[in-house]
Image (tube, coloured by chain):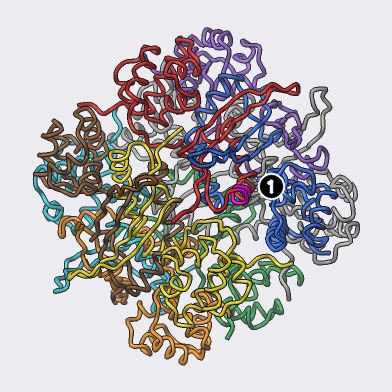
Chain colours: A yellow, B brown, C red, D blue, E purple, G cyan, H orange, J green
């Protein structure tokens, strides 16, 4: 008996295969007919895939059964502090430090006491052309959950 | 000579006046003709207001000159750890812990090596009706900045 | 204009009045016809009360309008690290450190990928007589939320 | 002489065998005639098993003697910070941050000065059907211990 | 209505009165017929006193009713990090860092799986004459609690 | 040339051999004619042993020369945070958080300005029978050192 | 006797006076004939001023003798974590996280084993016009100190 | 399939080859016709190289294809806390702790509300001869970005 | 009854009086016939003074009885993290980070297993003229304490 | 190509060889004609050695060329938190927490605004016989550097 390949080890192999075979994240997502942010997060270890999804994406990437098995594993979600400090990710954290209390105030004004779910939730990212420089547009879309006893 | 009223003290007075006079954040934003997330963040101490903006909003809130002065002050931006742990704000942090590395991967795939600016940046929040429960939709929209020597 | 009395200051006054007038938390909860854990948490600053609830409980406690106002305020939820280290609270934290991964495994086994909501949620506490020493029984009861895109 | 297989390594092998053989945590618990939360926690490394328990569960999982030995080891209990931040576990931590001081107040009101034991203690988890969505019900049940010199 | 004097503020007044009136901790403990470590800890804010104890000790110290009230308050137990780093206290922490795992191993060897209670617990301190320099002898004496489901 | 086996690796082998050969910590201590807490701490890596002690204990445990060498090494003393959070060890930490300032006050009252040495120091542990449940009695016994320039 | 006005309190008064009187940092620096970064840092509490400097700048700002006294005080240098997280300051920290090891490698290559002094040190800031957007140019200029026994 | 050699492992090999072959960082930068700070940072893992850059530098260093591949990888930027505490790097951190607030004040005075970009950014280092000891001159040069909604 | 003036408040008054009356630390130490480092530390709150010492130094500084009382108080020793990061203090910390393990190795080589006492301990500071720049010479002189059971 | 042996790995081999060959740190220092604290620190990885020093010391210790190479490497200086908590090292840290502010005050009084260099710096350790117990005497001797723009 060997342990299941860790989510991190599987993600490292996915990344290596993706680069060496010249496949985009979008192409991988398309292969399993899933939204691209969801698929990328799942391949990086944040969501469990179904057996079919894991099998198809590993076939495309020519990865073996140990990766197929690992991708189906229930993850322990989250990211270590070091990669969260990478500038591309940190800008989101900084935006929350600046706008978090305002978003909280406006959620309460519009919806009452409660939260935006991070579980019944989706994220989209797109490119918006702009003459002064194209823009990254990221949409967080979560069900409102009111504090309910 | 007295020090300028701190941004936090000014925000506390804005919050008190807003509640006692029954004014919404949206109404305050409208008064100064500014986007509602920007205006809320500014009133909570994260952006400097112009003299005109500060004067008009304090007139509406019946707040005195010390608040008008404070709202124009250049802030030191950011939020203490305790309020960042409030569940309504924490869900955004959690979403970043789950989706941050995926967003980074997709920004690099689409735009190359760089970041979404958090300075040339806007945030919008809206309510999207949904039969299974209305949704909070928050859009981060920042200019792409490529690593450029 | 004065700031609204902080939730902590209001809670300190509630605690003082409760002790001096010899009223139990259960009695306060009953006065506003609310579950006792909810009412206690609200009076300690973790939930906003309705105007009616705040008014009734302050009448009973003979507290003035500034407390009535504060109790209705939307809170920033959470507890500082120091009181979380108090032994009576720490035992719950310790239990999570011991049983948290097991609870996660069993939630996934029974419900699939998702969480117990901490928002659509209630907590009850009761005393269960036991010949070897009575027991504290605390029930966490939250809606299951499945990860749903 | 080789060191005893670590509790973590044993747990990784238990998890792998459990998944590959299609066995539920409930089935494993039943095999050793133990409560399911206790058994899951023990298999994940938080409690020592008896020789008989370890032998039976490893026979079912087809794991070798090194796992049998490890499962009997006295553990150093607790969980690292990273898995505690997983959303499924974090919701319990958040609930304590919101309700911890209220639970403390109510334990003191009902029982006097003391704590709920986390040692003379059991945890149960069950599913409660609900038309608005089934609920996760977790019960912490610990002996009251009064501060006693 | 004023808040109850905080435990820290009460302790500061006890310390001031004790020094100014030239009373030892032992004398204060004797006055309330309590063990000296318990009494000192209680006066420093770590245990609630009975009304009678608080009244008698405050009479001796000539402290007013606000201190009497505070000393009866249920405490949030624990000590901030700064005073824990004081050398006189730190030596105990260092001893635990050196001997903690050995004590755990020996508790398990002698008693089985469980802990020394810190609730059903007493501490004594005494001076033991020694020709090479007198010794501080501190005894921790807690009921063994076995892990019991 | 190979590095000396680390203290942790040696301790892991000692623990494995001790369990597999059915030897108690007390028996190991007796073999080297040393106090049991000292011997256990030394075998777990917190004290250097003499060559003779290391040789005799390894003979009994049937451990090879690399362990004999490691046990004589001067240690870097202390324990990582994770094992310090184990409940059996944590109760000592909690007791210090509750009684530390009182012990400091009483040491100063009895001895003057100074500390209990953690170097000229011994720890004993014993079981005290008690009809309400046997007790763990741990004695810290250190030379008083006065602040002396 | 009153304590000396703290450096922070003095800085708050300097900032208030500077804004209300419409004086630039450059103007204040010029008044005392000092480099602008040095003068700004000194007025914000990071360097002691001479009596003459403090007197002249307070005359210009119409601040009283308590500020003159405070500005001459030897500071405890450094900045709290919260203002260091402000985006305008954080970008420097981020640049060090990205380029720090490279700067270290190049200092050693060019100068040998040693450091750039932060004491025999000056900082300049200037604006460099650029058709694609003006640039902030900050120069750190410190004496090389070689590790020298 | 093997994972891509990590950036850290590639940097370790670059450092070893550079020393063993007696090549300076300046020489490596020259080989790929890039600024020396950029090239050093890239070789240490902070920037992705183009295929041509990676190929040329590895040819010079006689490193194999796995390093060529790794050097092209998109990095997760940043440096662990331990190397940031090295004295040669720490002096920059200390300078920011002393001058950070002053730089922020002067950026706002000269440019208005905004930041120096750390992305559209370059760093140069040079040696400036000085009779009292040569100086390390480091220039941070980033585009000003104004807060812009 | 008022609390005793805190050690920090007393130190702030000592510092103010010392500067305003133009007295050196050396002069204050001489007044009480004590070593200058000891006296400075005591006046800054790290050692209790005798009544005579406190009375004499306060007479010289023209400080009132509340300071005399505070200076005699048993301190809780230590320094907050912020002042420890001041460059003048930090250099000592850095030296320990570089030389600490070497000092430990050499203490063990020369003295055996034990420590330099920080209690039976004195510190001296002096200026040593040197043509290349005068030197700060700080001597730590503590009794060796061997680990002794 | 293999990476250079890390400083830590080289130090572990030096320590092993030193013990097995019965050589003192003093002997190793003498072999390379260097001060003993410097040599010990260098061998433990805190200073680069010259080729000649590394060659001679490795010849004496019978260590191979990989250690010779590693000892010449430019280090990243500093020590992890765990070994800094070892009691023999911690006493120095504690002494700084008690005397740091006093040393700062006295450096400023004697030398003006500046620091003791930790770069142009030496440390010596010696044994001073004393009838009450020999003493460890550690001297920090660093060039004074005045804050100089």
Q: How many marks?
A: 1
Residue nearer the viewer, G137 or B123: B123
Q: Position of residue A133 (x, y in %)?
A: 21, 70
Q: Is residue J38 visible?
A: no
The region drawn magenta spans C106-110
Q: Is residue C86 visible?
A: yes
Figure check: H146 above or below B77: below
10 Å crowding of disc 1: few (<14), some (14-19), many (20+): many
Q: Position of residue G112 (x, y in %)?
A: 43, 76
Figure check: H136 above or below B67: below
Residue nearer the viewer, C108 or B5: C108
Residue nearer the viewer, J122 or D61: D61
Residue D6 found in image quarter: bottom right
Q: Position of residue B58 (x, y in %)?
A: 13, 36
Secondary structure of the residue carrying numbered label 1: helix
Q: Is residue B20 magenta?
A: no
Residue B10 found in image quarter: top left
Figure check: D10 above or below E22: below
Residue H84 found in image quarter: bottom left
Q: Position of residue C34 (x, y in %)?
A: 45, 22
The residue indicated by pointer 1 is D41
């Amino acid at each position: 008996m060997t342990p299941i390949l860790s989510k991190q080890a599987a993600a490292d192999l996915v990344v290596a295969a993706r680069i060496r075979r010249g496949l985009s994240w979008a192409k991988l997502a398309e292969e399993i007919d899933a939204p691209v942010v969801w698929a990328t997060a799942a391949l990086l270890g944040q969501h469990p895939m179904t057996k079919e999804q894991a099998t198809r994406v590993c076939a495309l990437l020519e990865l073996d059964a140990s990766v197929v098995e690992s991708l189906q594993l229930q993850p322990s979600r989250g990211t270590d502090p070091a990669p969260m400090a990478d500038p591309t990710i940190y800008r989101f954290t900084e935006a929350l430090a600046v706008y978090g209390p305002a978003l909280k105030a406006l959620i309460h004004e519009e919806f009452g006491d409660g939260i935006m779910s991070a579980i019944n939730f989706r994220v989209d990212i797109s490119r918006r052309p702009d003459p002064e420089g194209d823009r990254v547009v990221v949409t967080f879309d979560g069900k409102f959950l009111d504090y309910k006893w």
